[in-house]
Amino acid sequence: MRALLILFQTAAWTADWPQFRGVDGHGVASGSRVPVHFSPASNVQWRTELPPGKSSPVIFGKRLCLTGSDAIKLTTLCLDTESGRVLWSQSVEARRKENRHVLNHPASPTPVGDGKNLYVFFSDFGLISYTLDGAERWRLPMEPFSNLHGMAASPILVGGKIILALDQDTSAHLLAIGKDSGRVLWKADRSDFTHSFSVPAVYRPVKGPAEIVMPGAYQMTGYSAETGEKLWWLRGLTWQPKSAPVVADGIAYFNGWAPGGDQGQQRDLPPFEQVIRTADLDGDGKLSQSEVPPDLRHSGSWGAIDLDHDDKLSARDWSFYRARRAARNALLAVRLGGRGDVTASHVLWRFDKSLPDVPCPLLYRDVLYLVRTGGIFTTVNPKTGEAFKQGRLNGALEGYYASPVAADGKIYAASEHGKVVVLKAEAEWEVLAVNDFGEDIYATPAIVGDRMYLRTGSAVYCIREKIGSRGSTPSAGPVQ
């Protein structure tokens, strides 16, 4: 009976795209006849202008939801998937203005929903729940965060809980919030981590409760979804992960890349106790910028290693700086189900050649797909970690921040400046089309049925094959 119920629930979800990267964050849709060729003027069912934002669309039946912000108002919008008409728009005022990277945005995190209700996270405010008809259910304001580049991880749903990763430079933690009550159910301490941007994934073993798979700075960790108990951990991740893991058949595939972590760039810095003996000229037990020996200084910003922003490096700051210089970028395959430290026992393979920075890996039809800045596209054997093919996406040799998605034997990869590359989904991939939208794309596309929903810098498009009417002008659905 339980297996039948799970099968029914999975089948029901295939008609929706309920979170960042769709069902369970896999980035795979069961749709068909999704177009290969399209543009702002062809194979577009509708286009609706939006306030600025970088969250990805989520789909529930005939409703599409996403967020935007004008830096004062934090807005959640719901559109009709048939016409692009705005069904409702709700806003809250920002409680503050978080520090964030220029590529981040107040409306970066993607909402998540259960088919009846929506859950939205804004780092300038906190967490809010609306019905899919636009009525506010509850709100959970949160205190300011200490993330150098601003928070960006999207919430996910596990059973009756919203799971929200709040990795930051001080007081990092993982939260479980009741989806109906808006109350914190448990809080897992992650103070041994610094800032990162990964969205957690879910592992559902055949027996036992679900587990949260949470990458972070230097370590991947598994938590009980019921209690938040730390179950296992794996050392050796990079220092600033941005990607999200893909969990399939008891294996987590995760790509972690950060500057300075490629093979051969590592450096073994001396322990804090050794440096402080000769460099601490004022005897305060910490290191000022001028006290750090020139050959040990960080080449980037001071704020990136001064985690508590007191203009000094403490033992904690130095330990993370030291770990950062030793960190190694890699695509990993990790066998799940372990307990304790699984570093030596559960890593199936590592791959480290030309890895993406932000885009997540895509597992589709027994092939792993990776896209990175420069238009470098790679296919990897998920069983062995060996590359099938690596090459450049000619016509779209630029930055990539949106994650690739798949449907109907095709891969869709959207570049930073609006080139949507369509590829044949095979180990020996080939480019089928490069579709130019002429404006930035940071949001990951959503696919449901024969439609792809694509957010650009100014609008969201519904892409759909128009039989016998290619090149027709799309109807508009402006924000009201």
Image (cartoon, rainbow, N blue to C red):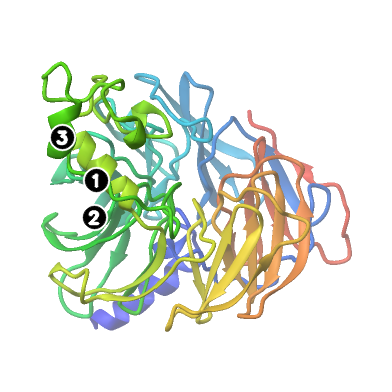
> At which x and y percent is residue 399?
63, 48
Residue found at x 47% / y 18%: 72
Q: Nearer the viewer, residue 89 or 260?
A: 260
* 108, above or below 375, in the image: above
Q: Is 367 or 257 nearer to us in this picture?
A: 257
Tag count in the figure?
3
Q: Is residue 131 above or below residue 254?
A: above
- Residue 247 location, quadrant: bottom left
Q: Amino acid at mark 3?
A: Ala
Q: Residue reaching furthest front?
A: 278
Q: CA distance from mark 1 to mark 2?
A: 8 Å
Q: Which mark is residue 180?
A: 1
Q: Secondary structure at mark 3?
A: helix
Q: Is residue 356 left or right of residue 163?
A: right
What whole-number distance in Å separates the C-alpha atoms at marks 2 and 3? 40 Å
Give the distance between the C-alpha atoms of the residues marked 3 and 1, in whole angstroms. Answer: 42 Å
Q: Residue at x 49, y 35 (%)?
A: 104
Query: Do callouts 3 and 1 mark residues in contact (Cβ within 8 Å)?
Result: no
Q: Position of residue 199 (x, y in %)?
A: 37, 52
- The spot of residue 130 in percent (x, y) is 37, 39
Does the residue at mark 1 contact the one at mark 2 (Cβ under 8 Å)? yes
Q: Earlier in the sequence, mark 2 or mark 3?
A: 2
Q: Which residue is mark 3?
A: 315
- Would you call the spot at circle 2 few (<14 residues within 10 Å), some (14-19), or many (20 or more)? some
Q: Residue at x 71, y 53 (%)?
A: 397
For residue 42, which numbered disc appears in the image? none
Dot 1 falls on a residue whose secondary structure is: loop
Q: For mark 1, does the 10 Å Cα neighbourhood hold few (<14), some (14 to 19), or many (20 or more) residues? A: few
Which one is earlier in the sequence, the residue at label 1 or at label 2?
Answer: 2
Residue at x-position 77% and y-position 42%: 438
Identify which amino acid the numbered label 1 is placed on: Asp
Indicate which disc residue 160 carries: 2
